Image: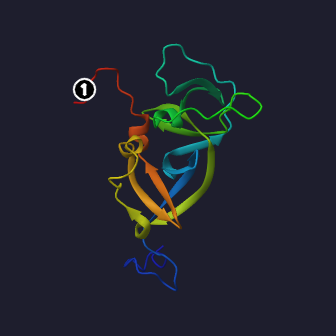
């Protein structure tokens, strides 16, 4: 272990990044690329058998069964204040394509997204603070951004994303 951690300066060795990196699972909502910290992601799956919940907040798609557990399915589109995906050309309703299994305070959630990308290992060199001109719908849920070859990866704060408070409640 000592040899593997011998270079602690963070300087590249032989052109390879050796500094601290973070791993992110990338997801798509429309054309926008978002990242979720990999340590928060437990599953990636295709949601099926979603049961709607009457009087639930708009972002709650419903409940589903994930390996014997009842899981709350939440639409990332709706949570970000975006409209639902448009219907297919043949008139059928667009269906959610993928879901990310997340845990918050002992509860399991399925975050319904348009698509799942790859796992990226990113260093501090591409990390930037949340820009002031980032879409206001994303700003409060983002921790930072990474610039990637002409694309912007918005890193989402899972705690803020899943942090529901009762209507009218004030944070202490």
Total label count? 1
Farthest residue, direction bottom: 14
Residue 107 x %, y %: 48, 30
Residue 54 x %, y %: 53, 13
Left or right of 46? Residue 128 is left
Location of residue 56 with respect to 156 vertically, above or below: above
Residue 104 x %, y %: 45, 35
Q: Nearer the viewer, residue 31 or 74?
A: 31
Secondary structure at numbered mark 1? loop
Q: Nearer the viewer, residue 140 or 101?
A: 140
Location of residue 131 with respect to 101 vertically, above or below: below
Q: Quadrant of residue 96?
A: top right
- Image quarter of the C terminus: top left
Left or right of 65? Residue 107 is left
The structure residue drawn at horizontal position 28% and vertical position 22%, both measured from the top left corner, is 169
Location of residue 24 with respect to 8 vertically, above or below: above
- Circle 1 is placed at which residue position? 170
The structure residue drawn at horizontal position 57% and vertical position 39%, both measured from the top left corner, is 101
Farthest residue, direction top: 54
Residue 24 x %, y %: 52, 55
Rendering colour mode:
rainbow
The structure residue drawn at horizontal position 35% and vertical position 55%, both measured from the top left corner, is 131
Q: Residues within 10 Å of mark 1 (few under 14, many from 20)?
A: few
Left or right of 84? Residue 48 is right
Q: Nearer the viewer, residue 8 or 129?
A: 129
């Amino acid at each position: 272990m000592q040899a593997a951690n011998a270079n602690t300066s963070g300087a590249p060795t032989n052109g390879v990044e050796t500094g601290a990196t973070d791993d992110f699972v990338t997801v798509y909502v429309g054309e926008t690329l978002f990242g979720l910290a990999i340590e928060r992601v437990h599953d990636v799956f295709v949601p099926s058998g979603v049961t709607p919940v009457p009087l639930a907040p708009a972002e709650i798609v419903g409940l589903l069964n994930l390996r014997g557990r009842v899981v709350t399915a939440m639409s990332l589109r709706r949570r970000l204040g975006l409209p639902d995906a448009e219907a297919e050309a043949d008139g059928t309703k667009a269906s959610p394509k993928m879901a990310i299994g997340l845990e918050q305070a002992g509860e399991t959630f399925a975050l319904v997204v348009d698509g799942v990308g790859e796992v990226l290992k990113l260093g501090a060199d591409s990390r930037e603070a949340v820009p002031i001109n980032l879409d206001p719908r994303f700003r409060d849920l983002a921790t930072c951004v990474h610039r990637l070859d002409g694309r912007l990866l918005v890193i989402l704060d899972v705690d803020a994303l899943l942090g529901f408070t009762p209507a009218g409640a004030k944070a202490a």
